[in-house]
Image (tube, grey):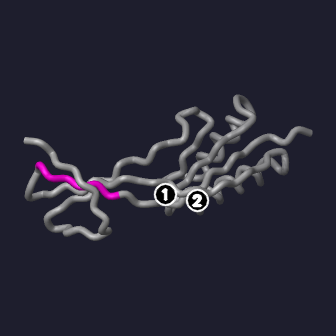
Amino acid sequence: MAITMSTTPSKRFDEKTNEMRRRPPIKPSNASNHIYITRKTNVDSQVKSVEEMLNNAFDEIFIHGMGASINKALVFATEVERRFGGSVKSDIQTSTVRCTDDIVSLLELDRAETRQRSVSAVHVHLYRVVS
């Protein structure tokens, strides 16, 4: 039983006979100074951990957010800058990330399709200012 894969150009699919499974996006880095913000991220607790990281271990932190979490990532970066009172600055970049979805047929288990979609992303580089 071979699984056949195809790419579907349409954004619509029959939800009664198919199931969409979103693959996790590729992360730019797995280093501990890269923080990924999601819709469920608690900003206050993350700000505290970033404060500890900047005070003890790192001179720069990278914050990444995609889609619905872009606003939260920017609020998070602004809050870190505010707490450090000008000793931390930021550079902001935007990008588009290609994500892949698998559409699996519930009727024919050996048939699956993939769909590519583009998601907006923001990348904030927080760094210490040399006095």
Of residues 65 and 18, the one drawn nearer to the viewer in this rendering: 18
Quarter of the picture holding the C terminus: top right
Reply yes or no: does residue 80 show up in magenta.
no
Q: Residue at x 67, y 40 (%)?
A: 61
Q: Which of marks 1 and 2 is nearer the N terminus?
A: 1
Q: Most prominent secondary structure in the magenta stretch?
A: strand
Q: In which quarter of the image is the N terminus?
A: top left
Q: Which residue is drawn at the image coordinates 27% and 61% (left, top)?
A: 8
Q: Say which residue label 1 marks.
A: 39
Q: Position of residue 81 (x, y in %)?
A: 76, 51
Q: Are marks 1 and 2 in contact (CB under 8 Å)?
A: yes
Q: Where is residue 53 in the image (x, y as percent from the top left)?
A: 68, 35
Q: Which amino acid does label 2 sit on?
A: Lys
Residue 75 image point, x, y percent: 65, 59
Residue neighbourhood size for the residue with mark 2, other residues' Cα within 10 Å, grouped as few (<14), some (14–19), many (≥20):
some
Q: What stretch is highlighted in magenta?
A: 110-115
Residue where numbered disc 2 is placed:
72
* Residue 79 placement, left or right of 122: right
Question: Looking at the picture, does residue 72 appear above or below residue 80?
Answer: below
Tell me the SS state at disc 1.
Answer: loop
For the point 68% across and 53% down, the residue is 77
The residue type indicated by label 1 comes to Arg
Answer with the quarter of the image where residue 58 lies: top right
Furthest toward the right, the residue is 131
Residue 26 horizontal/vertical position (percent): 46, 44
